[in-house]
């Protein structure tokens, strides 16, 4: 059984048409639109092998989540898309009804009708516990994957496979076909195929296979990030992917996120694949005594994290299991807080402007479930509000939507379609330094507790690249483009000159390739446009004779004739300035 829990301001839904031959019978009232407010919505997929024990465990899990978010109303919503291993409809309907009855002993329960396509709309709250996924298993066994030609594969050992079985399995695992029927033309998944940027495979659900072109974009962003952070006085560190469970219990993540953490063992120790970077960074801070003279201590990490997500909610680069966060943690004195937050805002503004995004900010304050005293929260919220007012920034106030350890400022960028994406964040934290007993020696030679700022600018690199691709429709600025120029031969007799031009551009540090196939120049230009290449260079008899290039800039049909040295100077300046 798979559950996706959404803590919502409201959900409204209405049955539209039958999804199975014999759906649940509906009363006249159930046929109308239903609206539930201030509720915990449980999107539920009942799977093969689920039984009464599954229901019992699901009810326990739902009760636990509801208690954390203080929800009194539960909406049970059948959602088959979370799984490809569904139970028979009659079994699923019966178990869902049993869940509803069991939950009704403690909660007000609304159950969406089973067996119908439904229109639905919901507004999910923005606090850290607003989305939680759970997988309920009752037999402790691995769930087999149905593979054509192999049947139910519970465990695969190389020696057990015949040569034919191995080939069948490889064919299945090599399938990466994307269903584009419901995607918009500028969807980053379609652009990713056209531009040969990345792919996904079921052997690693929700984890990106970066192709060479996509990895160039990723690394150019990393290079830019490093340059700006070095200018701003940040150190860069790297922490392990796997840490002892103890560290997550100290930080509080074990209690809040255990169901979303990948677990493993080493020499009988329980280990966790990190879902966050901050505890590892804190351990670096604790390796030696710290002095006020080191403050503000700015430590950045391009940290790779993993978080368990149900397969049904994965969505290209936007929702993944493995991703890189451009984390940074700033340790400082209380009196340094306002200036450091201003510095973060200035850096964030600079980066967003360079990448062509506008944005708005939101201030989220203390949630109902939190740690720390009211005095601490008063102080922290006041600092963030003062900074926003000093910067004369308009902001939306989200009461009760802060992190459990502190209030935060979130940056929401707006893309070319008017959609907003929460990327950057600044979180003011008095709690982690307390939990980890962080100290520094102050001017009076006394031991004191530092304050900690958590922050990201891009957030998830994967999601940010997806947003950037759709925002630009793949027409990335030249400095970010995987291929910055393509050389085309007009005819076969121009191939030698085209190759020479390509080599000259490569030697100048330009990312260039060529299309020397025996095709029409029109086809070659169209292929280059589909690949979103900034500059197309055509070499024909006229160009060979004049020793010039025919240059076509992306988005401009006009052809410019110029010497190769002039072209190189122009494009190198454009790349250097990151235009």
Image (tube, grey):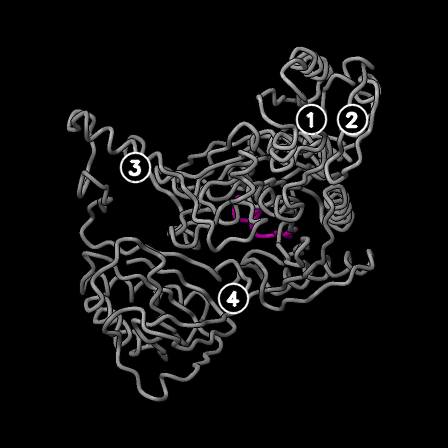
Point out the stretch of residues depicted in magenta. 426-436
Asked if residue 450 can be seen in this view, the reply is: no
Q: Tell whether 366 sits left or right of 272.
A: right
Rendering coords of residue 85 (x, y %): 26, 53
Q: Are marks 4 and 2 in contact (CB under 8 Å)?
A: no
Q: For the residue labelled by badge 2, is the local secondary structure a helix, a strand or a loop?
A: helix
Q: Tell whether 310 sits left or right of 334.
A: left
Rendering coords of residue 567 (x, y %): 80, 22
Q: Which residue is mark 2?
A: 571
| Gap between marks 2 and 3 measured at Cα | 44 Å
Q: Which residue is mark 1?
A: 485
Rendering coords of residue 228 (x, y %): 73, 34
| Gap between marks 1 and 2 measured at Cα | 9 Å
Q: Are marks 1 and 3 in contact (CB under 8 Å)?
A: no
* Circle 3 residues within 10 Å: few <14, some 14–19, many ≥20: some
Q: Quadrant of residue 547?
A: top right
Give me the residue at 49% from left, 71% from top: 121
Q: Image quadrant for the N terminus?
A: bottom left
As displayed, is residue 182 above or below residue 104?
Answer: above
Determine which of the numbered discs, if any, sits on residue 124 in the image.
4
Q: Nearer the viewer, residue 259 or 48?
A: 48
Q: Which residue is mark 3?
A: 172
Q: Earlier in the sequence, mark 2 or mark 3?
A: 3
Determine which of the numbered discs, if any, sits on residue 180 in the image.
none
């Amino acid at each position: 059984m798979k559950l996706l829990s959404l803590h919502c301001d409201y959900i409204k839904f209405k049955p539209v048409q039958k999804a199975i031959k014999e759906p649940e019978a509906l009363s006249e009232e159930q046929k109308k639109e239903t609206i539930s407010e201030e509720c915990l919505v449980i999107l539920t997929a009942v799977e093969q092998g689920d039984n009464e024990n599954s229901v019992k465990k699901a009810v326990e899990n739902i009760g636990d989540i509801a208690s954390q978010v203080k929800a009194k109303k539960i909406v049970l919503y059948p959602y088959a898309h979370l799984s490809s291993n569904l139970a028979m409809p009659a079994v699923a309907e019966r178990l869902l009804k049993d869940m509803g009855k069991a939950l009704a002993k403690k909660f007000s329960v609304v159950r969406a009708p089973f067996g119908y396509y439904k229109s639905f709309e919901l507004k999910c709250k923005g606090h850290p516990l607003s989305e939680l996924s759970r997988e309920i298993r009752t037999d402790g066994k691995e769930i087999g994957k149905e593979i054509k030609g192999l049947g139910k594969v519970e465990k695969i050992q190389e020696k057990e496979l015949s040569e034919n079985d191995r080939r069948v399995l490889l064919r299945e695992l090599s399938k990466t076909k994307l269903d584009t029927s419901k995607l918009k033309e500028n969807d980053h998944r379609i652009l990713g195929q056209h531009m040969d940027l990345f792919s996904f495979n079921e052997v690693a659900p929700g984890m990106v296979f970066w192709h060479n072109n996509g990895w160039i974009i990723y690394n150019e962003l990393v290079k830019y990030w490093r340059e700006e952070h070095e200018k701003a006085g940040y150190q860069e560190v790297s922490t392990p992917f796997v840490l002892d469970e103890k560290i997550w219990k100290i930080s509080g993540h074990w209690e809040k996120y255990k169901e979303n953490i990948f677990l493993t063992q080493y020499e009988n120790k329980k280990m966790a694949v990190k879902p966050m970077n901050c505890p590892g960074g804190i351990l670096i801070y604790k390796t030696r005594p710290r002095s006020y003279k080191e403050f503000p201590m700015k430590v950045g990490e391009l940290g790779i994290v993993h978080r368990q997500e149900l397969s049904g909610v994965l969505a290209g680069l936007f929702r993944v299991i493995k991703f890189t966060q451009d984390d940074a943690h700033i340790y400082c004195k209380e009196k340094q807080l306002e200036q450091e937050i201003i510095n973060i805002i200035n850096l964030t503004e600079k980066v967003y402007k360079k990448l062509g995004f506008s944005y708005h900010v939101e201030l989220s304050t203390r949630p109902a479930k939190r740690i720390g005293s009211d005095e601490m929260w008063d102080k922290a919220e006041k600092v963030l509000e003062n900074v926003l007012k000093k910067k004369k920034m308009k902001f939306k106030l989200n009461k009760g939507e802060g992190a459990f350890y502190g209030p935060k400022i979130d940056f929401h960028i707006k893309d070319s379609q008017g959609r907003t994406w929460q990327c950057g964040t600044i979180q003011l934290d008095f709690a982690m330094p307390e939990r980890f007993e962080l100290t520094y020696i102050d001017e009076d030679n006394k031991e004191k507790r530092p304050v900690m700022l958590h922050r990201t600018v891009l957030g998830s690199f994967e999601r940010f690249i997806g947003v950037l691709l759709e925002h630009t429709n793949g027409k990335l600025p030249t400095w970010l483009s995987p291929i910055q120029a393509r050389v085309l031969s007009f005819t076969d007799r121009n191939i030698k000159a085209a190759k020479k031009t390509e080599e000259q551009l490569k030697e100048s540090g330009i990312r260039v390739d060529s299309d020397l196939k025996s095709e029409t120049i029109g086809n070659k230009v169209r292929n280059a446009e589909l690949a979103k290449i900034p500059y197309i260079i055509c070499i024909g008899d006229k160009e060979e004779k004049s020793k010039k290039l025919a240059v076509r800039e992306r988005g401009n049909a006009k052809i410019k004739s110029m010497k190769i040295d002039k072209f190189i100077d122009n494009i190198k300046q454009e790349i250097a300035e990151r235009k």
